[in-house]
């Protein structure tokens, strides 16, 4: 009969072998990167993050908000290593103001906005905005969210902004704006195409790009990630074919 000491040694050897096998299975040099993501891109980023981890072993940890909010956090010392903005302006400023690595900025995606309602009969084109069938219309805060700025530009280009100004409700970012529409706090709103690309519910009008400044979304390597191999690998992966396919699935146009 095996003694207690012999059984303990056997179990200890098995535990050591298990630890060794796990160490051998883990990708060499696997690391972690902290990524700040514009709210419109968070679902896409999560899918890209899963692909990134599967291919490289590195893990991306995401935080999201409006582009303007994130930039303030970066300026105040937030520990982000990569910034995926919803515009070109803030990543460019991050380089100019010394928060990001010169030469690392590139356009990773181009976004589209959609006038969307859960009501399948409400949205039937730009003429919807001239009607009186709705009491509120949701947009993202145009001061901090590029998708909100594009919504204001669109309404102005269509000549309806002044008439609709009193009916506008603002989300802090495009994620909150979408929630306003989904929860019927606003019967319709300007949301990101990526937020509704996976379904055909409700009614929608895809805003022509001629109605607003193109929503070119830039990425940049922040100073905190300059020496992080996982941060540089994430930006390389973001420009590659796997990420490109995911971005297209969510309705984004190509970047650089």
Image: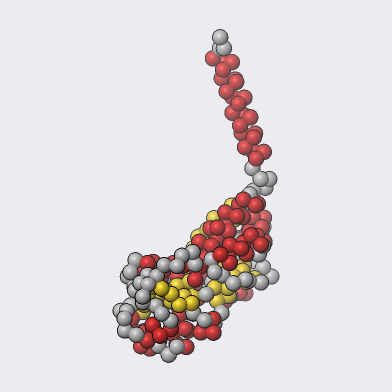
Residue 5: x and y, percent?
57, 15
Given residues 59 and 256, the one toward you in this image is: 256
Left or right of 166 in this view: 49? right
Left or right of 10 in this view: 138? left
Farthest residue in the bottom direction?
Answer: 159
Left or right of 139 in this view: 10? right
Indicate the colouring scheme.
Answer: secondary structure
Residue 226: x and y, percent?
65, 61
Farthest residue in the top direction?
Answer: 1
Quadrant of image for the C terminus = bottom right
Residue 221: x and y, percent?
63, 64
Q: Residue at x 67, y 55 (%)?
A: 229
Residue 138: tell me if it is visible: no
Residue 164: x and y, percent?
36, 84
Q: Residue at x 59, y 15 (%)?
A: 6
Given residues 97 and 142, the one toward you in this image is: 142
Residue 186: tell me if it is visible: yes
Q: Residue at x 64, y 35 (%)?
A: 21
Q: Residue at x 55, y 61 (%)?
A: 45
How many marks the image carries: the answer is 0
Determine which quarter of the picture holds residue 20. top right
């Amino acid at each position: 009969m095996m003694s207690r000491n012999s059984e303990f040694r056997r179990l200890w050897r098995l535990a050591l072998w298990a630890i060794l096998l796990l160490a051998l299975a883990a990708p060499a040099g696997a690391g972690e990167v902290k990524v700040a993501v514009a709210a419109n891109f968070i679902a896409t980023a999560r899918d890209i993050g899963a692909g990134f981890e599967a291919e490289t072993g590195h893990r991306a940890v995401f935080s999201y908000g409006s582009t303007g909010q994130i930039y303030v956090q970066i300026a105040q010392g937030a520990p982000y290593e990569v910034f995926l903005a919803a515009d070109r302006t803030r990543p460019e400023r991050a380089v100019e103001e010394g928060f990001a690595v010169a030469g690392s900025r590139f356009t990773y995606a181009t976004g589209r906005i959609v006038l969307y309602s859960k009501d399948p009969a409400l949205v039937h084109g730009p003429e919807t905005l001239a009607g009186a069938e709705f009491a509120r219309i949701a947009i993202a805060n145009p001061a901090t969210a590029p998708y909100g700025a594009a919504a204001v530009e669109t309404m102005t280009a269509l000549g309806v902004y002044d008439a609709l100004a009193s009916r506008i409700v603002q989300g802090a970012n495009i994620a909150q704006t979408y929630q306003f529409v989904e929860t019927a706090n606003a019967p319709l709103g300007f949301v990101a195409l990526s937020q509704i690309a996976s379904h055909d519910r409700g009614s929608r009008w895809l805003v022509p790009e001629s109605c607003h400044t193109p929503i070119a979304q830039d990425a940049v390597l922040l100073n905190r990630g300059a020496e992080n191999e996982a941060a540089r690998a994430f930006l390389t992966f973001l420009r590659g074919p796997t990420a490109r396919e995911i971005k297209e699935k969510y309705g984004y146009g190509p970047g650089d």
